[in-house]
């Protein structure tokens, strides 16, 4: 965003803001909003982190305590063991990064082909891919689930295997659309130059197109991982085996069997990976959102 | 450099092909200007090779789409008109549809879905826009505030939903405690048929409003400052500037987001499922998608589930069509 001095004016004019009354009002509103937002959006997280440190009795006490009276970090260790969080987290990491790998290889190749190699019927394929965006995801859950149970032609049952999450994640038409639109903006002369130097399509993709596409690849990758990490219904259906559950499904399934403070500690642990991802890649995530919004 | 193997590919079909093709090929070769024929064939070979490579790059993705997107789309329609009993599948025509329409849960689920959508729009559509307008005025701390609003979007849903479940608890929950300290009437939240749906909407807005807010902020930053200046010179107050400059300037994004939000909230599943087990007190949070889930995975009635899915699809498509037509007309 532009620096405070250089930004163009908004709803309220700078002159109005510089008057003493304007200044006072601005700072009042600002402080109120900062305090309110911190309470509303950070408050629950604070409650979660400290709730995991409280005793079974203290966590359900009314009124709640602001600080745990005797912090018990042991709750976290207990939650880690009782809920089998290591297993759940490992499963989710395998699903998420496998899906990322499949999307990066197959969707990038497809978008490159549709954008630069332009085969016959390429536009038809693109149209049919984009058409899937029109069909609400939940409508397809039942037939997709049946497909996973018995893959047509091959007759394989993918239930309880990572393939049930990896392969459907490739059918993300929006990812292909974003990638294709980015590849379209790469000038053809560059590719021609590579071809004259003797580079085949694969070499061109690797040495010319991909290095130029880092920003869009970052956006697509982050959303690929986050989508799998946040998904609930699909892994609930396709990975029902307790040893294969994701963090979301696993904690939900076990949450009624253990004490509240343990569940809350488990939730805190489950939230750490995506929060770290957010703090690291904040800039890419925010630019990715606006890339998505321009699609209309 | 590797032209030779591909000329053989293009020559391949001629021996097997019909005699006329082979004859024509031979005639071409025999022709005095044999160079022209060779160039043609080389061009064809290059074309074939180019297409083979291009389709080679496409094939993996296309297969995934075929198996997990296009085939299920067709299967959905077929399922809606079939019934499977004891392993035998038969065509039943419209009977699945009749069955779901006569289920009292059908109309109840639609009513809840529409109520949920209306409430979600009231909160989930207005709140991000207002927040974006306020944040856009700030000269300080915008990065912090934007990160705060987006934070819940990055949480795993199980974390945010279970947190809200604890907050909503009528006994020890945080919300009732706060209301009690402020001497306000407390509520049964998720456990009352009156407030269950609203409670789900509040939680869902908290979880999801981040993305919409950031998209609106980006749109607001694209409004030229001169427009506000001109409006101010014409004597427009704060509210009139919002009404006559901000909203018309962001109308495209607003109308698109409204459409996407309606489509998304009509498909709500995870939040009610996690918060109230799906049905809620006396079925007060049963939504259409939860009903689909029940048909398919609790009653093993895939036909009814597919039929209801088809109804949802038709309703959403009709809504989108009408909506796009209305907003288009506004452009003229």
Image (cartoon, rainbow, N blue to C red):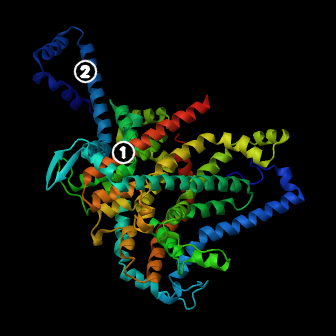
Q: Position of residue A253 (x, y in %)?
A: 35, 73
Which residue, given by chain and number where applicable, does mark 1 sit on?
B311
In screen coordinates, is B264 left or right of B53? right
Q: Position of residue B158 (x, y in %)?
A: 44, 68
Q: Position of residue B120 (x, y in %)?
A: 54, 55
Which residue, given by chain and number where applicable, does mark 2 sit on?
B41
Chain identifier of the residue bearing label 2 in the image? B
Q: Is residue B234 visible in the rendered structure shown here?
A: yes
Residue plotted at (27% across, 13% down): B36
Q: Are marks 1 and 2 in contact (CB under 8 Å)?
A: no
Do badges 1 and 2 share one subunit?
Answer: yes
| Mark 1 or 2: the one toward you | 1
Q: Position of residue A256 (x, y in %)?
A: 38, 78
Query: Please, is residue B23 above or below residue B284 in the view?
Result: above
**Considering depth in this image, is B111 or A55 the residue closer to the camera?**
B111
**Considering depth in this image, is B93 or B7 the residue closer to the camera?**
B93
Dot placed on the residue nearer the N-terminal end, 1 or 2: 2
- Which residue is situated farthest in the right direction here? A20
Query: Please, is residue A234 above or below residue B176 in the view?
Result: above
Binning the other alpha carbons within 10 Å of mark 1 as few (below 14), some (14 to 19) or many (20 upward) gives some
Q: Is residue A284 visible in the rendered structure shown here?
A: no
* Marks 1/2: CA–CA distance: 53 Å
Q: Secondary structure at mark 2?
A: helix
In screen coordinates, is B158 left or right of A102? right
């Amino acid at each position: 965003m532009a620096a405070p001095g250089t930004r163009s004016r908004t709803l309220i004019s700078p002159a109005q803001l510089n008057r003493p009354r304007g200044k006072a009002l601005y700072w009042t509103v600002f402080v109120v909003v900062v305090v309110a937002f911190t309470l509303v959006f950070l408050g629950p997280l604070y409650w979660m982190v400290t709730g995991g440190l409280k005793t079974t009795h203290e966590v359900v006490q009314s009124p709640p305590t602001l600080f745990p009276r005797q912090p018990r970090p042991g709750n976290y260790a207990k939650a880690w063991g009782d809920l089998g969080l290591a297993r759940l987290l490992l499963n989710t990491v395998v699903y998420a990064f496998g899906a990322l790998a499949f999307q990066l290889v197959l969707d990038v190749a497809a978008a490159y082909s549709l954008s630069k190699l332009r085969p016959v019927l390429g536009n038809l394929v693109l149209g049919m891919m984009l058409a899937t965006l029109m069909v609400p995801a939940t409508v397809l859950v039942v037939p997709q689930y049946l497909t996973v149970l018995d893959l047509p032609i091959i007759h394989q049952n993918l239930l309880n295997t990572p393939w049930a999450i990896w392969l459907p994640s490739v059918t993300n038409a929006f990812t292909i659309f974003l990638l294709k639109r980015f590849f379209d903006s790469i000038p053809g002369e560059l590719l021609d130059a590579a071809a004259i130097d003797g580079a085949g399509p694969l070499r061109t993709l690797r040495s010319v197109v991909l290095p130029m596409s880092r920003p869009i690849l970052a956006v697509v990758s982050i959303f690929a991982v986050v989508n799998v990490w946040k998904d609930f219904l699909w892994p609930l259906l396709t990975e029902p085996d307790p040893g294969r559950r994701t963090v979301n499904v696993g904690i939900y399934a076990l949450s009624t069997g253990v004490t509240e403070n343990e569940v809350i500690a488990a939730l805190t642990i489950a939230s750490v990976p995506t929060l770290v991802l957010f703090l690291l890649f904040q800039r890419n995530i925010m630019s990715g959102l606006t890339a998505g919004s321009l699609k209309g | 450099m590797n032209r030779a193997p591909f000329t053989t590919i293009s020559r391949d079909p001629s021996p097997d092909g019909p005699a006329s093709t082979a004859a024509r090929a031979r005639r071409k070769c025999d022709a005095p200007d044999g160079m022209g024929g060779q160039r043609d064939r080389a061009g064809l070979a290059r074309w074939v090779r180019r297409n083979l490579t291009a389709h080679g790059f496409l094939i993996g993705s296309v297969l995934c789409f075929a198996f997990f997107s296009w085939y299920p789309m067709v299967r959905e329609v077929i399922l809606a008109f079939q019934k499977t009993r004891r392993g035998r599948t038969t065509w039943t025509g419209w009977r699945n549809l009749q069955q779901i329409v006569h289920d009292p849960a059908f109309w109840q689920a639609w009513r809840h879905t529409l109520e949920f959508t209306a409430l979600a729009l009231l909160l989930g559509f207005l709140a991000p826009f207002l927040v974006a307008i306020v944040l856009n005025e700030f000269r300080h701390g915008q990065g912090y505030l934007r990160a705060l609003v987006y934070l819940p979007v990055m949480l795993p849903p199980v974390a945010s939903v279970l947190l809200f479940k604890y907050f909503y608890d009528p006994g020890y929950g945080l919300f009732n405690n706060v209301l009690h300290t402020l001497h306000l009437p407390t509520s049964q939240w998720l456990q009352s048929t009156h407030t269950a749906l609203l409670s789900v909407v509040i939680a869902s807005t908290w979880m999801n409003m981040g993305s919409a807010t950031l998209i609106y902020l980006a749109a607001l930053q694209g409004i030229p400052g001169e427009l506000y200046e001109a409006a101010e010179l014409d004597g427009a107050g704060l509210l009139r500037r919002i009404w006559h400059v901000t909203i018309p300037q962001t109308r495209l994004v607003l109308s698109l987001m409204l459409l996407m939000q309606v489509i998304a909230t009509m498909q709500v599943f995870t939040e009610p499922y996690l918060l109230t087990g799906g049905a809620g007190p006396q079925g007060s949070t049963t939504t259409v998608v939860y009903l689909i889930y029940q048909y398919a995975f609790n009653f093993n009635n895939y036909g009814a589930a597919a039929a209801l899915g088809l109804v949802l699809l038709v309703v959403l498509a009709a809504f989108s069509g009408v909506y796009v037509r209305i907003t288009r007309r506004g452009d003229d």
